[in-house]
Image: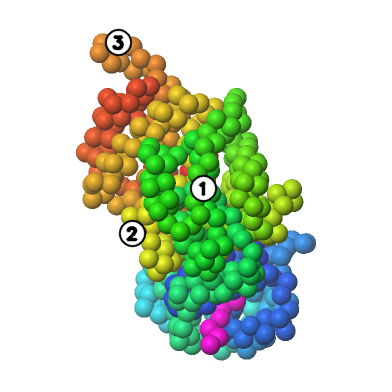
Amino acid sequence: MKNETVLIVDFGGQYKELIARRVRECGVHSLIVPCGITADEARRHEPIGLIFTGGPDSVYLDGAPTCTPELLDLGIPVLGICYGMQLMCRLLGGEVSPAEKSEYGAVDAALEASSGLFHGFSGEYKVLMSHTDRVTRMPEGFRVTARSALCPIAGMENEKAGYYGVQFHPETDRTHDGAEIIRNFLYRICGASGDYSMEDYMKKQVAEARSRVGKKRVLLALSGGVDSSVCAALLSEALPGQLTCIYIDHGFMRKNETDEVRAVFEKKDLNFIHIDARSRFLKRLEGVTDPETKRKRIGAEFVRAFEDAAKTCGNPEFLAQGTIYPDIVESGKHSAVIKSHHNVGGLPEEMGFEGIIEPLSGLFKDEVRKIGLILGLPKKLVYRQPFPGPGLAIRIIGEVTEKKLGILREADAILREEIGKSRAKADQYFAVLTDTRSVGVMGDARTYDYVLALRAIRTNDFMTGEFARLPYPLLARISSRITNEVGGINRVVYDVTGKPPATIEWE
């Protein structure tokens, strides 16, 4: 049975996959397509609606991303978000101009409850704005449906034609009840019935893996984290007996994690191989302080480590990775580079694999966890704290040394232990060893040791987030334990920056 589908027309925005995720959460299949898609190509998908994404450009500049106006004539509803609204306006004869003042972050906006898009809303709501341009003249037949102090046309619609636009981003958590706006568009405007689920996604990925791989073998980079573990479980179901899981111990894991990984996966039928590569990775980072250089060197060493591993296990034809979409977004595969991820960027020709398998690349962290539970993985593993591929190497600011790794492991273990046994609400939390030293006093003696930063985030999608409001007594207990139990740290600070403007990780 073919699922109802909404096409997400991509104009280069950072949040396009988040839009797709919000649509899927509502039980509707979504598909991201390039803005150059033709009307005939769009029709072949039989969509029930279109969503135009945001984008970093100005619609009135030469060379700015655009689409064929025929997409607006398919006879189905269209929702334009940010740049998407501005482009819709321009294509239909309206006017877009630079705003007198830019709007960034959460602002108050008045939403018209009479609009189907804002059904159930009344009065002012916090919405996430991120724009330097604005609609200054609407096309014929449109009316204003949302306003903010700096944006008189923060929402517009032509209900008869099925055109809807919002200047803000309802797909993000920072727009209050933004998911309901997406739901209104899908069900009240597009007439969706809701026939899509994560089980459907999993079945599709299993079928695609079987079709692509056939009887050939697959080598998986198993880190023991949520993403690679779910990837292993999914591919083991799709390709029983064809999967080899290799754990490259780069020496940057959290306290006791290598032992835990081995204990879990050596018992499973995954052809599990453990490779101790700690010394080679640490040597590659000698004298390196730049975070992008760290990531790239670690990535390059992973390539070499897997080349060596592949030779020892009969040269499997495919390489599998637990890449998820936030990795791709931040690496700039579809947008601006924020930071590189070692598992993103394409398959180096010299590796000798026929191709790469990334069955989770269209999912966000919470969706990956849902798939893991469906596959029967232990809840403790599925809800394990997220951990970047380069590990503690990018949670040490400056040069990575064995001594610094030891300090950070102990401090991070205390943080995770204390938050884990408390009732504090935090979706990701970890410690960062800064390259700053400060003067302290211990036992009436002067110290000059490292400053440790604590990071705790509340988020659903890991694309946006706010710092967790941890109780002061909990922070005090963590700080006291770290400064008393971990040598080399005499000061602990707490990071109270959201994403954006910061990222979740420091490097």
Disc 3 to disc 2, C-alpha distance: 47 Å
Residue at 52 percent across and 37 percent down: it is 276
Query: Which span is picked out in magenta?
Result: 1-9
Mark 3 and mark 2 lie on one chain; the one further toward the N terminus is 2
Number of marks drawn: 3
Residue 13 appearing in the image: no
The amino acid sitting under disc 1 is: Ile
- Closer to us: 324 or 277: 277
Mark 2 and mark 1 lie on one chain; the one further toward the N terminus is 1
Q: Residues within 10 Å of mark 3 (few under 14, many from 20)?
A: few
Residue at 42 percent across and 63 percent down: it is 372
Relative placement, left or right, of 123 versus 277 is left
Q: Which mark is residue 46?
A: none
Residue at 49 percent across and 77 percent down: it is 200
The amino acid sitting under disc 2 is: Lys
Q: Which residue is mark 3?
A: 445
The image shows residue 323, relative to residue 439, as above or below, that is below
Task: Give the structural element (helix, strand or loop) at label 3.
Answer: strand
- Closer to us: 417 or 234: 234
Query: Magenta stretch: residue 457 in it?
Result: no
Relative placement, left or right, of 355 versus 219 is right
Q: Position of residue 325 (x, y in %)?
A: 55, 59
Residue that protrudes farthest toward the top in the picture: 445
The quarter of the picture where residue 382 lies is bottom left
Q: Which residue is mark 2?
A: 379
Q: Which mark is residue 273?
A: 1
The image shows residue 6, relative to residue 390, as above or below, that is below
